[in-house]
Image: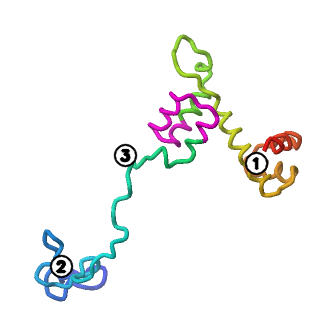
Amino acid sequence: MLGLRGCAMSDKRTSEGEIAQGDLFGAPSGGAQGVGARRAGEGADGAGGEYLEMCGAQNFCPDADPRFADLRRIGLPRAWLMVAETIGFDAWLEVWRRISADESLLHDGGQRMPKLRSFDAYLRFQRNRYIDALAARGMSVPQVARAVARNLREPLDEKHVAKIMRRR
């Protein structure tokens, strides 16, 4: 039976007639040269090949994600920030969007939950940051208004865009 490269499936992969395999401490068995990463006498250069620094089971580091700073800047209550840091930023946005969309949660109804701003507040915040970035690039009010309409699919009056740009 032939393998992918036309060799018999029973052919050995080393020139010594054995399968290259390191012992417990990494030395190749039987002096075989090995193939690929198992070659004898060629040590690793010491860079890479290690585990990434991990902050948790899901490799989630809230301090490393600058988007959490945005949540703090818009005044999200500490309790909701803790939820966001626990579940991750993208999952938090989905939870927040869904809570904001549920009309039955708009009124307290006896439930004790920290106040949560509408998800639209976050969208407006990001839109305004986008407008600020375009203004910083020297774009005019009409150019910024067109870019927002085209890229964010949010048509804004030029007077409103100018007001946002003045706040910079």
- Nearest the viewer among 6 and 105 is 105
For the N terminus, the image quarter is bottom left
Q: Amino acid at mark 2?
A: Ala
- Image check: 146 left or right of 96? right
Task: Report the Cα–Cα distance between label 2 and label 3.
Answer: 36 Å
Examine the residues drawn in magenta and state their main secondary structure. Answer: helix
x 18%, y 79%: residue:
20
Callout 2: few (<14), some (14-19), or many (20+) C-alpha neighbours within 10 Å? many
Callout 1: few (<14), some (14-19), or many (20+) C-alpha neighbours within 10 Å? many
Callout 3: few (<14), some (14-19), or many (20+) C-alpha neighbours within 10 Å? few
Residue 43 in the image: x percent, y percent?
Answer: 27, 78
> Which residue position is annotated with label 2?
20
Q: Quadrant of residue 56?
A: top left
> Which residue position is annotated with label 3?
56
Q: Which mark is residue 132?
A: 1
- Nearest the viewer among 52 and 106 is 52
Q: State which region is magenta.
A: 70-94
x 67%, y 39%: residue:
123
